[in-house]
Amino acid sequence: MEKLVIEGGKPLNGEVRISGAKNAALPLIAATLLAPGVHVLHNVPDLRDTRTILRLLESLGLVWEREGTTLKIDGSGLRYSEASYELVKTMRASVLVLGPLLARLGRAKVSLPGGCAIGARPINFHLMGFEQLGVCCELEHGYVDAHIEGRMQGGTVYFDIPSVTGTENLLMAASLAKGETVIKNAAREPEIGNLIDMLSAMGAEIEGKGSDRLVVHGVEQLTAAESTIIPDRIEAGTYAIAIGAAGGDSIIKGCDPGHLPSLLEKLRLAGIKIEVGEDYLRVMASPLKNSIHPVDVTTMPYPGYPTDLQAQFMALMACSSGLSVIHETIFENRFMHVAELQRMGATIQIDGRIAMVKGLENKRLKGAQVMATDLRASSSLVIAGLAAEGRTDISRIYHLERGYENMVDKLTGLGAAVWKENE
Ligand code: EPZ
C-alpha cells in the first residue's frame, strides 16, 4: 500500500491544469450502452473510477480504447445485462448502467451498491422512477433484477431529493421510452447538462436543461456521437481551497468558474482574493496566520454549496481566525475527516450533521500520521497537510486516486513538497 507524504508550510505558487470531471465521465461512459457504433469522448480523466466503469462495460460485452484523454467506445457488442457485486461494490456509480441496459435490452441485473463511508446511499428513487416507466424491479440476494417486456412507456417521475445519478439514470432510460417522460425535482448539477448534451447529440429529445423539470420525448433509437467531458469543478474547487489554506498566488487553468458560484463567494468571505477568467481562476491568499476569516457553510444541491467540497472547506476553516459552523445536509455520515483533522490539532465539535470548527488563531495545524477514509475526506487531509507545520503521512490513498488525476504532479507543479512512499 502507498502513502502520501507532505512537508507542509510552503505557499503554493504556479499553475495547475484541471482534468475532465469524474462525475460527468461516469454517466457519459455509461450512456455509450444506449447505442451501437463507436462513441468518442474527449477530455476523459484517467482515474480509478473511470477504469472501474470501463471494466464493467467490458463485462457487458463492449470494447474500448484510450488515446490520451480521448476514449473510443463501441456500443455494438452489448450482450450481457448483469453487473456483478465484485465490480459494483468498489464503485456505487455502477448503478448508472441500469437505465441504459433497461432501455437497450429491457432487462438489467445489478448488485445493490451497498453503503459507503459517507452514508447508506440507497437507490430507491432510481427504482421508483423506473417503475413509473413500466419496469418491474425485484430485489433479491443483494441484487436488483429489473425487466420489462418491450419498450418502456413514458411517465412522470418525482424525486423527493434531487438525486444526481437518479436524474441521470432516468434521463438515459426515458430517452428510448415510448412517449413523453417528465422528471420533476430533477438535480441541476452541471454534469447533468453534460449528459443531456451527449444524449441530444445521439438523437435524444430533451427539454429543460439546467432546470429542475426535464421533459424527454422518447425516440426509437439513438446513434453513437462525439462528446467532450466538462472540467472537474470539484477538483478545481479542491485546488482553490488548498491555495487558500497554504497561501500563495496561483492560476487554476482549464476550469469553468461558472460551475463554482457558491464556493467562490465563500472563499471571498474567507478573505481569499479570486480573479475569474473565462476558463481559469487566479487564487491569491496570504500565507500568514490569522489571514483566513471564519465562514459558515451549509451544503445544498446545485447551485448551492457542494457537499463534495465540504471536507476540503473544513480543513480551511480549521486554519481560520475564529468559529465557523458547517452543516452537511446531503449525506448522513460525511464527517469521517474530522477525527483525522483533530489529530493534526484542529478543534472541531460535531453535533449530528453540524460541525463547529474553532480556528487556530495564532497557531498552525501540526503534521501527523493520518488515514484517508473516502475520496473527499482524503483531499481534506491533503489540504491540511499542505497548510500544517511539519510532515504529514496520509495512508490508504487509493481513496484519493479514485477522483484526482496526477495529484502529486499537480501539487509539485505548485511548489508543494509532496511525494508517495510505500507504507
Ligand atoms: C452524486 O452521488 C455524486 N456521485 C456524489 O459525488 C455527490 O456527493 C452526490 O451526487 C451529491 O451531489 C456521482 O455523480 C458519481 P444523490 P449520488 O443521489 O447520485 C439520497 C464524489 O465524491 N438518495 O444526489 O449517489 C442519498 O442518500 C461523490 O465524487 C436516496 O435516499 O447522490 C443522499 O442523501 C460522492 N435515494 C441524497 O439523496 C436514492 O435513490 C443525494 O444523493 C438516491 C439518493
Image (spheres, rainbow, N blue to C red):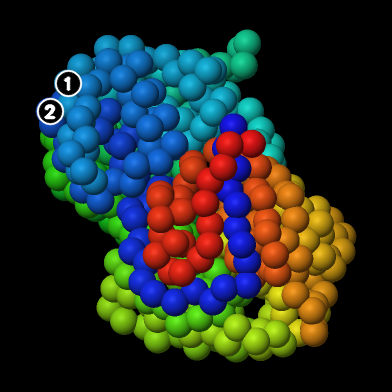
Quadrant, the C terminus: top right
Q: Secondary structure at mark 1?
A: helix
- Residue marked by disc 2: 37
Label 1 Cα crowd, 10 Å radius (few <14 / some 14-19 / many 20+): some
- Residue marked by disc 1: 76
Label 2 Cα crowd, 10 Å radius (few <14 / some 14-19 / many 20+): some
Asked whether the viewer can see residue 181, the reply is no
Ranked by sequence position, the earlier of labels 1 and 2 is 2
* Residue occupying image coordinates x 21% and y 43%: 68
CA–CA distance in space, label 1 to label 2: 5 Å
Q: Quadrant of residue 168?
A: top left
| Coordinates of residue 332 in the picture (x, y in percent) | 73, 48
| Coordinates of residue 379 in the picture (x, y in percent) | 58, 55
Q: Quadrant of residue 300?
A: bottom right
Vertical placement of residue 325 versus 68, above or below: below
Quadrant, the N terminus: top right
Q: Are marks 1 and 2 in contact (CB under 8 Å)?
A: yes
Vertical placement of residue 350 versus 196, above or below: below
| Coordinates of residue 209 in the picture (x, y in percent) | 32, 59
State whether label 1 is within 8 Å of ligand 1.
no
Q: Quadrant of residue 223?
A: top left
